[in-house]
């Protein structure tokens, strides 16, 4: 059985003996860093920030996709993710997502959008998938 990896992310240090990293995926370039409390300059979001951001953006994009497919008059979506990572080392990482659907929506449409957002691919990946990570090199 052959393995098929569909996407790559390349990451490399920007400067020698420094924390910040530059990442490349498809045609996109972005950076990652750690905060001042960890000894860096907080020049970019941390890996945890990107993890949380993946959930926030996926919920918004899924709601937009759902609304467009169903003809729901959704004008904008705003999400905010709050992180409680105090027990991460014990295996507990809590995220609370606030979602605001804007537009002339009925209560029923808002409920449908919330359900769709709760079934976004990243939410399911974070809560239902078995993730395998192999480090080589």
Image (cartoon, grey):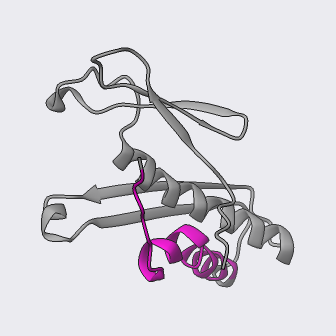
Viewer can see residue 20 = yes
Image point 21% across, 58% down: which residue? Answer: 85
Q: Position of residue 123 (x, y in %)?
A: 50, 72
Name the main secondary structure of what is drawn in magenta. helix
Q: Position of residue 43 (x, y in %)?
A: 37, 22
Image point 38% across, 45% down: which residue? Answer: 47
Picture quadrant of residue 113: bottom right
Q: Position of residue 24 (x, y in %)?
A: 60, 35
- In this rendering, the answer to whether 86 lies above or below 117 is above
Picture quadrant of residue 87: bottom left
Q: Which residues are magenta?
A: 109-136
Image point 40% across, 35% down: which residue? Answer: 45
Quadrant where the N terminus is found in the figure: bottom right
**Residue 10 colored magenta?**
no
- In this rendering, the answer to whether 4 lies above or below 40 is below
Q: Nearer the viewer, residue 117 or 22?
A: 22
Left or right of 101, for residue 45? left
Q: Nearer the viewer, residue 35 or 83?
A: 35
Number of marks in picture: 0
Picture quadrant of residue 110: bottom right
Viewer can see residue 71 = no
Image point 84% across, 77% down: which residue? Answer: 70
- In this rendering, the answer to whether 16 lies above or below 69 is above
**Residue 126 colored magenta?**
yes
Q: Position of residue 3 (x, y in %)?
A: 64, 69
């Amino acid at each position: 059985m052959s393995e098929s990896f569909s996407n790559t992310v390349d990451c490399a240090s920007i400067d020698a003996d420094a924390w910040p990293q530059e990442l490349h995926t498809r045609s996109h370039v972005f950076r990652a860093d750690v905060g001042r409390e960890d000894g860096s300059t907080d020049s970019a979001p941390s890996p945890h920030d990107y993890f949380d951001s993946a959930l926030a953006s996926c919920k918004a994009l899924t709601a937009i996709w759902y609304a467009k497919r169903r003809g729901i008059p959704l004008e904008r979506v705003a999400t905010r993710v709050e992180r409680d990572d105090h027990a991460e080392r014990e295996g507990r990482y809590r995220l609370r997502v606030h979602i605001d659907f804007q537009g002339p929506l009925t209560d029923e449409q808002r409920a449908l959008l919330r359900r769709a957002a709760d079934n976004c691919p990243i939410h399911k990946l974070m809560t239902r998938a078995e993730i395998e990570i192999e480090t080589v090199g």
